[in-house]
Image: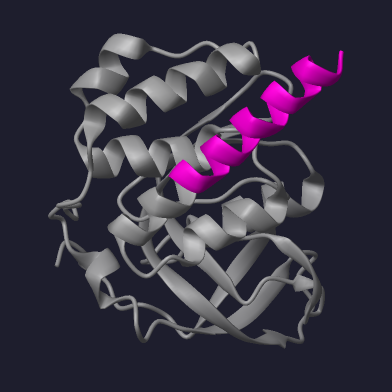
Amino acid sequence: MRRGFDLPETIPLFPLPGAVLMPRARLPLQIFEPRYLQMVEDVLKTPARLIGMIQPAEGGLDALAQVGCAGRIGAFSELDDGRLMISLRAISRFHLREIQPGFTPYIRARVGWSGYEGDLSSDAERDPGFARQPFMARLLRFLKLHELSADWDQAEASDEETLINSLSMMLPFAVEEKQALLECATLSARRELLEGLLEYALRAGDSEETIQ
């Protein structure tokens, strides 16, 4: 365990389509909306300094996904125009239980942490089935297909958890696909889903080239 605070029953939520925070990862955010500037100000006054990243979802509780990930504000800076740059360090995923009524301009919710005890460990999760060379070859094809750039040396040097979680956060997948990656119970399951999404995108790209 690496935290010096108790996980609270209620946390503020930041619904942001396409933005997911994976276990032991970091997420930089630019805050400019007044309600979320207020949220950050309030959060910095609490011992845990937690913000729950969660995705909008059709049919969910108040149109929110049922699983999110809480991050602790580790660094922040204020820009001249009033915007805030913050960095969230993942603490744990959570289950959304209910939206809490109140007078804050942002959403607060009661959450449950059970089932995600492994997220609290400082030790990276291992993936015994990870085959780096074919995975990286598939990733390179995907990046070329979508005309995306990457720090290839850093990707090659990263351990499997850092690589898989970073790609799950950064690659341009649909909201529901990123949510599925977040909810994977193990790193191996996340990697298998990620490989499937990459392969599906590559096959779709090949089909479009054939049609043209």
Residue at (51%, 41%) from the top-left corner? Answer: 169
What secondary structure characterizes most of the magenta part?
helix
Foreground residue among 110 and 44: 110
211 part of magenta stretch:
yes
Foreground residue among 166 and 24: 166
Q: Which residues are magenta?
A: 195-212
Residue at (30%, 57%) from the top-left corner? Answer: 187
In the rendered view, tell whether residue 127 sits above or below residue 97.
above
Please state the horizontal and vertical placement of residue 58, each as a whole percent of the image.
Answer: 83, 70
Picture quarter containing residue 25? top left
Which quadrant of the rendered structure holds the C terminus?
top right
90 part of magenta stretch:
no
Q: Say left or right for 188 vs 76.
A: left
Is residue 194 visible to us here?
A: yes
Q: Say left or right for 149 vs 97.
A: left
Please state the horizontal and vertical placement of residue 149, each as a whole percent of the image.
Answer: 52, 10
Please state the horizontal and vertical placement of residue 177, each as a whole percent of the image.
Answer: 63, 53
Residue at (67%, 71%) from the top-left corner? Answer: 65
Is residue 16 visible to us here?
A: no
Residue sitting farthest toward the right: 212
Please state the horizontal and vertical placement of residue 206, each as a whole percent of the image.
Answer: 68, 23
Residue at (64%, 11%) from the top-left corner? Answer: 147
Which quadrant of the rendered structure holds the N terminus?
bottom left
